[in-house]
């Protein structure tokens, strides 16, 4: 078989020749303590660990990458094995042996690709499982070869990992081999024929970010879509058989996943591109590309019906695709709240601290800034070996500041505050103008607040439960008599209503009666506010009372009523008697307040009229 070698393969062969001439013994340079420690290298998640293999595949010029799960049970259990398969240019059997070593790379100091130190493949694999096998084949090879690294076997000093002459731990020679059954089945089902490429199989898995194959797949699809968004046009990445869609965390790239979700759209601000000289070589320069986006207030808002736990969100329990997408869009922004840094199009880190000219807050997720730098500027953006963190130099922070990044962030923050204030004012007006919305809002707030009440202390007495059942039966009977519907049907509907809304405001109109009453109706606490009392006319329904105060008044009455329904029968009598006294005194006090307030306003108006009518004040006013 005759093929033309690519530059990558030529570099690979030259590297093998160079180390062979140095009597390289393939020592893994590791002890049992090293192996234990390297497992805790600190990958943020299973995704960032697997991305080390994705980077290698892309650098090997792969067109397709497949992440395969060995699901021995079902989607609810974690995969027992994971394989990363690519159709890149592959490796020679000698290079496979080098690739499993820590520091085994032919790309040292190569700025063009994504990796250069040779730590990624072995470190990422052992951070997930205790065994990994690397299979590879080039087009100029007839067979696939593999090397297996088993941490437990190495710890036992298994002979296959011990050099008989030096007694050093070494990587075994590559052997001709075939793929595991679950890989072969997948490739056959997807009709994938590999002329060359690399397959990494991780076994004895004991460290995964998610507890089931289903949640892991969903998580990896989002993380991969974000991290490799700029590569997915030329490289297909399949997660458990499903093609990954690109995701722009700024949501301003048309065609990317979640771009057109919902009526609101993210707003793209003018992008920028700046040339930055290399700090160590002024003749060399790199490019920094800047993108900005702001999100309208309410862009990430979810209805109460959409509130789900993190587990439910990850499991995608809801059947409503719109709710799933909204939830995921919010999840993406939360994990990208800060300044997003990319190297040559590949996302590396989101910096949310140690920014010298600003601090990132929760509400800063309503704007997004992306900084994409070229490899010539690696010294300005120090990247950790595991490619998970960026440390920006003081010089580069100053350059970004001068380029208008901070100014753009401040403008987007002001826009958010302006829109937030306008929306809150609008909703406050709606609550003030609509008694129905006001009452429903107060009921919802009280239901939420009551979750923090002491459960044991606030246990409902039996006599109140009995009263609730009797009131529910009476209400069902009255409605049945009025509508002609069967009483049992009405009662079932009432039970659904009272269970779904634990607090309810209703009204009555009766002179010489308390300003409120309370009753237990089924499982619902019902507050009855008296329209004939000054509490209603002068306070609760007064147009001059703002929305917050009206709802605060409702909370006071709710708490009084709720407490009354959590006491003994004797204390209940106390509440009823005292409520009459409170109401009389409150009515008299509000009447006095109304008179004094009106008199005070009249006196003030008179004083202003007298002041304005005096000649010298008219003169002074004119001069002003």
Image: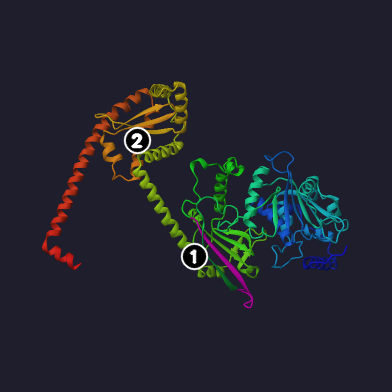
- Binning the other alpha carbons within 10 Å of mark 2 as few (below 14), some (14 to 19) or many (20 upward) gives many
The quarter holding residue 504 reads top left
x and y percentages locating residue 451 in the rendered image: 46, 36
In the structure shown, which secondary structural element does the residue marked by tag 1 occupy? Answer: helix
x and y percentages locating residue 418 in the rendered image: 41, 57
Q: What residue is rendered at 65% in x and 68% in y?
A: 375
**Can residue 286 be found in the magenta stretch?**
yes
Q: Is residue 589 left or right of residue 524?
A: left
x and y percentages locating residue 30 in the rendered image: 76, 56
x and y percentages locating residue 257 in the rendered image: 60, 53
CB-based contact (under 8 Å), mark 1 and mark 2: no
Question: In the rendered image, which quarter contains the N terminus?
Answer: bottom right
Residues 68 and 2: in front is: 2
Residues 29 and 52: in front is: 52
Q: Is residue 273 left or right of residue 454?
A: right
Label placed on residue 557? 2
**Can residue 473 be found in the magenta stretch?**
no
Measure how far apart labels 1 and 2 are at the Cα level. Answer: 48 Å
Residue, disc 1 = 406
Q: Is any atom of residue 428 visible in this view?
A: yes
Residues 93 and 544: in front is: 544
Q: Residue furthest left?
A: 615
- Binning the other alpha carbons within 10 Å of mark 1 as few (below 14), some (14 to 19) or many (20 upward) gives some
Q: Which residues are magenta?
A: 277-295
The quarter holding residue 611 reads bottom left
In the structure shown, which secondary structural element does the residue marked by tag 2 occupy? Answer: helix
Q: What residue is rendered at 82% in x and 54% in y?
A: 147
The quarter holding residue 525 reads top left
Q: Is any atom of residue 456 visible in this view?
A: no
Question: In the rendered image, which quarter contains the C terminus?
Answer: bottom left
Mark earlier in primary sequence (1, 2):
1
């Amino acid at each position: 078989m005759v093929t033309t070698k690519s530059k990558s393969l030529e570099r690979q062969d030259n590297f093998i020749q160079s180390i062979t001439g140095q009597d390289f013994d393939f020592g893994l340079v590791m002890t049992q303590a090293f192996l234990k420690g390297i497992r805790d290298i600190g990958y943020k998640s299973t995704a960032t660990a697997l991305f080390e293999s994705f980077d290698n595949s892309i650098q090997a010029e792969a067109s397709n990458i497949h992440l395969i799960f060995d699901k021995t049970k079902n989607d609810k259990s974690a995969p027992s094995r994971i394989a990363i398969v690519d159709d890149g240019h592959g490796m020679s059997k000698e290079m496979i042996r080098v690739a499993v070593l820590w520091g085994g790379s032919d790309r040292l100091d190569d700025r063009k690709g994504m990796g250069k130190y040779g730590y990624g493949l072995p470190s990422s694999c052992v951070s997930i499982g205790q065994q990994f096998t690397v299979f590879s084949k080039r087009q100029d090879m007839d067979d696939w070869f593999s090397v297996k690294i088993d941490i437990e076997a190495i710890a036992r000093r298994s002979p296959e990992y011990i050099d008989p002459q030096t007694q050093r731990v070494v990587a075994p020679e590559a052997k001709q081999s075939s793929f595991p059954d679950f890989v072969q089945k997948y490739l056959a089902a997807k009709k994938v024929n590999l002329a060359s490429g690399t397959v990494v199989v991780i076994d004895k898995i004991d460290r995964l970010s998610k507890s089931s194959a289903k949640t892991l797949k969903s998580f990896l699809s989002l993380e991969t879509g974000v991290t490799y968004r700029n590569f997915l046009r030329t490289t297909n990445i399949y997660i458990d058989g499903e093609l990954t869609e690109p995701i722009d965390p700024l949501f301003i790239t048309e065609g990317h996943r979640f771009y057109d979700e919902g009526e609101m759209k993210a707003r793209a601000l003018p992008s920028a591109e700046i040339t930055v000289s290399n700090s160590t070589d002024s003749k060399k320069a790199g490019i920094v590309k800047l993108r900005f986006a702001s999100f309208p207030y309410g862009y990430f808002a979810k209805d109460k019906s959409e509130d789900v736990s993190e587990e439910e969100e990850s499991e995608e329990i809801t059947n409503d695709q719109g709710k799933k997408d909204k939830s995921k869009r919010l999840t993406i922004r939360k994990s990208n709240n800060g300044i997003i840094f990319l190297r040559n199009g590949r996302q590396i880190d989101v910096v949310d601290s140690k920014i010298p000219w600003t601090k990132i807050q929760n509400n800063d997720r309503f704007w997004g800034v992306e900084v994409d730098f070229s490899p010539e500027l690696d010294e300005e953006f120090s990247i950790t070996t595991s490619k998970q963190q960026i440390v920006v130099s003081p010089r580069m922070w100053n350059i970004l500041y001068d380029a208008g990044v901070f100014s753009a962030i401040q403008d987007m923050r002001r826009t958010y505050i302006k829109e937030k204030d306008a929306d809150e004012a609008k909703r406050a007006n709606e609550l003030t103008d609509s008694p129905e919305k006001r009452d429903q809002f107060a009921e919802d707030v009280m239901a939420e607040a009551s979750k923090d009440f002491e459960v044991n202390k606030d246990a409902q007495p039996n006599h109140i439960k009995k009263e609730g059942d009797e009131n529910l039966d009476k209400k069902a009977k009255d409605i049945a008599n009025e509508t002609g519907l069967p009483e049992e049907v009405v009662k079932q509907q009432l039970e659904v209503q009272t269970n779904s809304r634990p607090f309810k405001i209703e009204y009555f109109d009766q002179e010489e009666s308390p300003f409120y009453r309370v009753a237990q109706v089924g499982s619902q606490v019902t507050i009855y506010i008296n329209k004939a009392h000054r509490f209603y006319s002068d306070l609760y329904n007064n147009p001059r009372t703002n929305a917050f105060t009206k709802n605060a008044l409702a909370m006071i009455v709710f708490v009084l009523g709720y407490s009354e329904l959590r006491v003994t029968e004797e204390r209940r009598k106390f509440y009823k008697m005292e409520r009459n006294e409170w109401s009389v005194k409150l009515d008299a006090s509000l009447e006095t307040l109304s008179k004094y307030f009106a008199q005070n306003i009249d006196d003030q108006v008179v004083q202003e009229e007298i002041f304005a009518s005096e000649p010298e004040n008219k003169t002074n006013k004119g001069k002003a």
